[in-house]
Image (tube, rainbow, N blue to C red):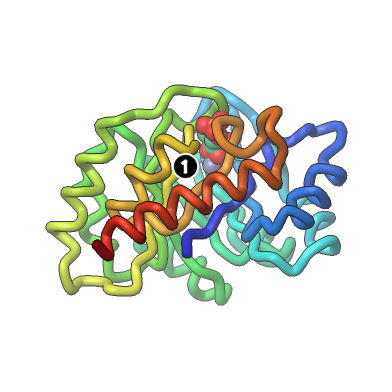
Amino acid sequence: MIIITASLMCASQLYLYRDVRSLLNAGIDMFHFDIMDGDFVENIALNIDLIKELRSVTHKKFDAHLMVRRPSKFISRLKDAGVNIIYFHIEAAEDPHYVIELIKREGLEAGLVINPETSLERIYPYIGQIDYLMFMTVQPGFAGQKFEHAVLHKIDQLREFRCGKNDSLKLVADGAINEKTLPQLAERGVHVFVGGSAGLFNQEGFNNNLEILKQRDLMVTSLEKK
Ligand code: DX5
Ligand code: ZN
């Protein structure tokens, strides 16, 4: 069964608590926090205090997607705030071995993120060390962009490389996830999906949207069995 993590930058910032409660009632699996520093990406979003406050509302897993230049500076505060998984970008100018080590030392799960135009080879040296690999399927920084189809080839490329190197590695996709894009990713082995403006935070409502996204995965699974 796939996992949907709700991207809270796409929620109403005014009625954030209301949206979180509704997502919990609808059966959301996890919550996704996009942390942006206005430097690594041309936007500023969410902060650690918000995570800390929301931690008192739910025991669901929290994942933090760091779109910042120096991810190592924030690891221990994110841990204290109640985050379970930290993803940082391979493009952030820091030694990934060092950052992964810091995340693990805090007892958290570690994930690397790769932008659509970054070559997959850059993550090869770290594949044995990480718990998650997140593919950006839009450019990082803003909600509401179009799906980057070329990323599908990158996921295929990973399948060839990875064979036997890290069997427990979980694949994540972030950006423009909806009923059309999810099946194409799920059939390539993506297991965790960031629900944003495209497929979760729209007029149709959380109950309906979650049901549709989960159904699309079941369709992929049953086709594979045939
Ligand atoms: C983009 C963020 C995503 C975003 C995806 O930089 O990382 O989490 O919210 O949402 P949509 O569905 O709008 O692409
Ligand atoms: Zn994100």
Residue at left 40%, top 37%? 181
Q: On the rendered structure, is 162 left or right of 14? A: left
Q: Type of residue at label 1?
A: Asp
* Callout 1 crowding tier (Cα within 10 Å): few <14, some 14–19, many ≥20: many
Closest to the observer, 51 or 144: 144
Q: Is residue 23 above or below residue 201?
A: below
Q: On the rendered structure, is 173 left or right of 16? A: left
Q: Is residue 192 above or below residue 141?
A: below
Question: Which quadrant of the frame does ligand 1 lie within?
Answer: top right
Q: Which residue is mark 1?
A: 174
Position of residue 212 measured from the top left corner of the image (x, y, whole percent)? 55, 45
Position of residue 197 measured from the top left corner of the image (x, y, whole percent)? 60, 31
Which residue occupies the extreme left position in the image? 160
Mark 1, ligand 2, within 8 Å: the answer is yes
Q: Is residue 185 above or below residue 44?
A: below
Closest to the observer, 180 or 84: 180
Closest to the observer, 154 or 99: 154
Residue at left 84%, top 55%? 53
Position of residue 124 measured from the top left corner of the image (x, y, whole percent)? 21, 57
Q: On the rendered structure, is 139 left or right of 116? A: right
The answer to whether residue 196 of the structure is visible from this angle is yes
Residue at left 34%, top 29%? 148
Residue at left 68%, top 32%? 204
Helix, strand, or loop for circle 1?
Answer: strand
Q: On the rendered structure, is 79 left or right of 143? A: right
Which residue occupies the extreme front position in the image? 226
Quadrant for residue 166, please give it.
Answer: bottom left
Position of residue 92 measured from the top left corner of the image (x, y, whole percent)? 41, 42
Closest to the observer, 109 or 30: 30
Q: Name the image quarter holding the C terminus.
A: bottom left
Q: Is residue 190 above or below residue 127?
A: above
